[in-house]
Image (cartoon, rainbow, N blue to C red):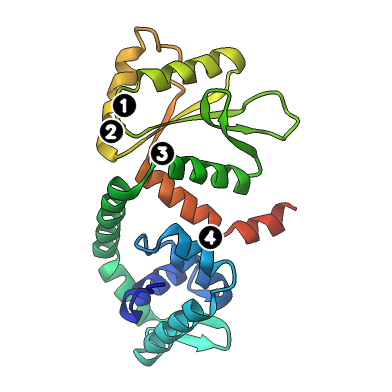
Amino acid sequence: MAYPVIERIELPILQELVATGGEEDVRFLYDRLVAYFPQMTETDVHALRNGHRGGWRRIVQRAGRALDDQRLIERHRGLWVITNAGRKRAADEATQFSLAQTAESAAGDLATFTHVEAQQMLLDVGRVLGYYAQMEFEYYDVVWREGEASPRLSHVFEVQRKGSIDSALAKLKHAYDAQRSKPYLIVASEHDTGRAQKHLSEARAGAFHEIGRVTTIFSFAELRRLHRALTSVEDILAGIFE
């Protein structure tokens, strides 16, 4: 497993501390920091959550020690507190870091995402949010229900990696007409998102006009960010809602 270098972890630590009001227990930082590194594969992320956490924790601890040495944070046992100097560095570098990570993530999504990977992420997101999720149900790519015994499909997803979206929209329209299911279209890129939105806008006067105003469109990059954000706190959410 290829971990990011220590220097690349420093800024995400500062950003997380800023986001949590200035301090955080390091135990909660380990999982959240993973989402900052889209070059880590899903296999890597799965391994981190299933017994291979020691190496990642050591890397994060070394980054924390480096920040402490620079007086950007203070460490009090397991509690990490950002200093004024740390806040300044986070503010100075946040925009540049965000743009770089967004570009890297989008490029990786376009190059590596498959139809099945997108479906699996939708299953994971549904599970974290408390839905009963299924792949390839009838002729839909992914569906969510309120519970396993629920007859209604509350959310229906179609993944469109390439080609015409008319077939996907036809399936979403059928689900909406049948049960007023919430329709979601997942497309490969931000560019495809714009094209799909334009298509739906034009469709409001045609065959798909009924779902034009209710269909939500996500790109693969947006789905990946959502997936990583939610799965990184899955254990915490389970404890809250159990």
Q: Which residue is mark 1?
A: 196
Query: Image height check: is 212 above or below 4?
Result: above
Q: Residue furthest bottom?
A: 69
Q: Quadrant of the N terminus?
A: bottom left
* Image coords of residue 26 (percent x, y): 54, 77
* Image coords of residue 151 (percent x, y): 71, 23
Neighbourhood count class around disc 1 (C-alpha, 10 Å): few under 14, some 14–19, many 20 upward: many
Residue plotted at (52% across, 62% down): 46
Which amino acid type corresponds to the residue marked 3 in the rendered image? His
Res 18 visible: yes
Q: Which residue is mark 2?
A: 192
Count of numbered circles in the view: 4
User: Helix, strand, or loop for circle 1?
Assistant: helix
Spatial separation of the CA atoms under disc 4 and disc 2: 27 Å
Tell me, yes or no, whether the two marked residues, 1 and 2, touch with CB atoms within 8 Å.
Answer: yes
- Indicate which disc residue 115 carries: 3
Spatial separation of the CA atoms under disc 1 and disc 3: 17 Å
Q: Which residue is mark 4?
A: 232
